[in-house]
């Protein structure tokens, strides 16, 4: 297996991007990544694009060749859309990694995009629920806030963790996001504001939930032995995992573990020959405050039920032992669903290059964790500064 | 690059499959392919699923892990949906091929599925039009029948071919489909019936157009050097191509050529070290009668404008020099969009095993051609009996 590096990154800000259609968002992020990589676009040999709901919200499918044409890629380039709900971009990133690691290509463009805020909010709710098993749980009325409300109740019950501790995830991530120009929400919030925000799905309140957004993020991947030609700061992809989880909540044996995270992480740690203690910082899938605690345990950083304690002790702050979501995460950046997985990669590469607006000191190894649907699909990637 | 073989195939019939939800269709086809390959499902290391419009028509996305769970695949298996309109399954097949050829996996399951007939017909029209560039052409009212009507007029004008010659594609393919138990339409039609069928998009009439359908098709791929363990009749994938075409009709320099076909075919011929004259029979993307003539020329079998002559001369009949769509093609089988590309593979493998219901004599090498959207994406695969 050949080594693979990230040599270029690009991202739109996440938020309400009025007047920017889907293909323009993707094109902006990709062009930025191509410029950042200092490559000629004619060198790109394949393009993978992650997206979740452009069909339902915008009546637009087949967007990978559409964006490929906007980018004026060579007509020899296979352009492929992949979809795995909130994990769509994590999968796109992995497909690019596989294509280069296997020797099938030398330079690959990967991206994720979502355009959500132009559709009415109730259409967004329906669209996002398409990530569930519609026949089993979706049409019965379960939503993702509903699902994570159940998870939060169980977690609080099993481990004696308070809703205030869970709410502090939002305080931390909003403070981080306040420094990130790509974040939708750039205002700090207090725990009191979190607790007083309006109820969404008991015990979760508004500030416990991430928000929809428009946005796109992109990366240029390159065989590792060529990376020096293009950049002084190559970042190597040393581990990649993608696994299968449960498609319905009722099938999951434990509400406080998202099993796909555990397996995808094991695959990535094994490929990288690293263990959780070797990771310097993490961008993980905090679609809800409770998800960050659960994820941080499933990724092997803390014992089950101890993620809240680690947060309270400051371990996951940007100046702590293991900063989690120094970008602000989904809670502050917003969640343009199909873009998020590569948005995390963009944040990690900026950290490893030492150019992040909320820099983690001595960042050498970062981990990206992206999960989709009812935990049925998830990816973990480990990136390392050379 | 390692050799890759098809060791198992499965397919539902195509048609109006009432009471069979999407995930059940996919599960049926996959289970048949797994049984046909005589493997234990625990040996499957990855799963790619092609689908186009389950989000728009059924409010169901993230179907790859959903079907992966129905199949009880190992929870280590990455399950990935790919989408490229009518080419979705061609892309899924190619992703599986790449994963094995590159050494990333030894045994991969690939499938395509679509469930269309349970939705009202006008929702199907909207759904299928999402394959176009919605902002540029889709919302202006162009549909796929409209597009191929324009192509037919131009073709007739440029090459002096009559609409009767074009209609004979339907007569041939319906006659082939009459022998195929997987076809939606199993009744022969006369040229007179084609000419008298109701107008759809001038000069195309009802029997010039393929029909929507429900259906799923699947294949089990395996590293070539293991194939003998599982089957006495391995079929090798000797060529694979996927290219980029124009996303809008107005951008295409020539209406009578689908350029993505030319490029994807060149890639596949080059990989296989074969030329068009080496191909024994073809399953190509006859979404409309005119498409078969255009495709047969773009694939290099006939000079531009001579596809109709070849048809009139009987060359493309099942007992001709180059049988085209001995399965009945999309015109007779129906077009469950996201399944079609692997449906073609199923037909080709059955021919190469000598077990097809409309057998091509001495079939050694078959070519599958799948094209999506306004010709923006296309795949070509060449399969060979060992």
Image (cartoon, coloured by chain):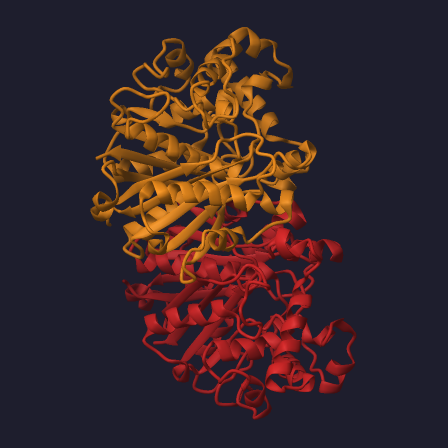
Chain colours: A orange, B red
Q: Using the image as rendered, state which of residue B20 and residue B379 is in the foreground.
A: B379
Work out which residue is located at the far bottom of the displayed protein and give it: B313
Q: Using the image as rendered, state which of residue A132 and residue B355 is in the foreground.
A: A132
Left or right, B374 with reference to A103 = right
Using the image, determine if residue B318 lies above or below residue B11.
below
Residue A307: x and y in percent read: 40, 17
Left or right, B29 with reference to A217 = right
Work out which residue is located at the far top of the displayed protein and give it: A192
Quadrant position of residue B158: bottom right
The residue positioned 55% from the left and 77% from the top of the image is B294
Using the image, determine if residue A134 lies above or below residue B23.
above
Quadrant location of the N terminus of chain B? bottom left
Q: Is residue A84 visible?
A: no
Residue B242: x and y in percent read: 43, 63
Using the image, determine if residue A136 lies above or below residue B374.
above
The residue positioned 63% from the left and 77% from the top of the image is B154
Quadrant position of residue A15: top right
Q: Using the image as rendered, state which of residue A26 and residue A314 is in the foreground.
A: A26
Q: Is residue B319 visible?
A: yes
Quadrant position of residue B176: bottom right
**Tag count:** 0
Using the image, determine if residue B358 lies above or below residue A279.
below
Quadrant location of the C terminus of chain B? bottom left
Residue A91: x and y in percent read: 43, 43
The residue positioned 45% from the left and 72% from the top of the image is B262
Residue A256: x and y in percent read: 48, 24
């Amino acid at each position: 297996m050949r080594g693979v590096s990230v040599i270029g990154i690009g991202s739109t800000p996440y938020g309400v991007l009025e007047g920017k259609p889907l293909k323009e968002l993707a094109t902006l992020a990709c062009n930025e990544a191509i410029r950042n990589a200092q490559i000629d676009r004619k060198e790109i040999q394949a393009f993978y694009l992650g997206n979740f709901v452009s069909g339902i919200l915008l009546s637009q499918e087949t967007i990978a060749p559409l964006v490929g044409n906007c980018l004026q890629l060579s007509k020899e380039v296979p352009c492929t859309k992949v979809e795995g709900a909130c994990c769509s971009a994590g999968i796109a990133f992995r497909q690019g990694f596989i294509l280069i690691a296997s020797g099938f290509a030398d330079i690959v463009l990967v991206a994720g995009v979502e355009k959500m805020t132009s559709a009415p909010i109730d259409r967004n709710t329906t669209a996002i629920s398409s990530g569930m098993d519609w026949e089993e749980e979706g049409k019965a009325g379960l939503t993702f806030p509903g699902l994570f409300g159940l998870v939060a109740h169980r977690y609080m019950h099993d481990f004696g963790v308070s809703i205030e501790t869970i709410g502090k995830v939002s305080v931390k991530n909003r403070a981080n996001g306040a420094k990130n120009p790509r974040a939708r929400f750039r205002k700090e919030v207090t725990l009191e504001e979190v607790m007083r925000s309006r109820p969404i799905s008991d015990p979760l309140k508004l500030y416990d939930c991430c928000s929809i957004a428009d946005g796109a993020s992109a990366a240029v991947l390159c065989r590792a032995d060529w990376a020096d030609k293009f950049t002084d700061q190559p970042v190597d992809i040393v581990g990649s995992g993608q696994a299968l989880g449960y498609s319905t909540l009722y099938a999951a044996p434990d509400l406080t573990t998202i099993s796909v995270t555990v397996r995808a992480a094991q695959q990535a740690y094994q490929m990288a020959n690293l263990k959780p203690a070797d990771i310097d910082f993490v961008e993980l899938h905090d679609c809800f405050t409770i998800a960050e605690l659960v994820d941080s345990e499933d990724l092997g950083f803390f014992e089950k039920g101890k993620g809240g304690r680690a947060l309270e002790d400051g371990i996951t702050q940007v100046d702590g032992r293991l900063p989690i979501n120094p970008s602000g995460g989904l809670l502050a950046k917003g969640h343009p669903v199909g873009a998020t997985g590569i948005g995390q990669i963009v944040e990690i590469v900026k950290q490893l290059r030492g150019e992040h607006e909320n820099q983690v000191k001595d960042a050498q190894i970062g981990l990206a964790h992206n999960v989709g649907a009812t935990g049925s699909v998830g990816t973990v990637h480990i990136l390392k500064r050379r």
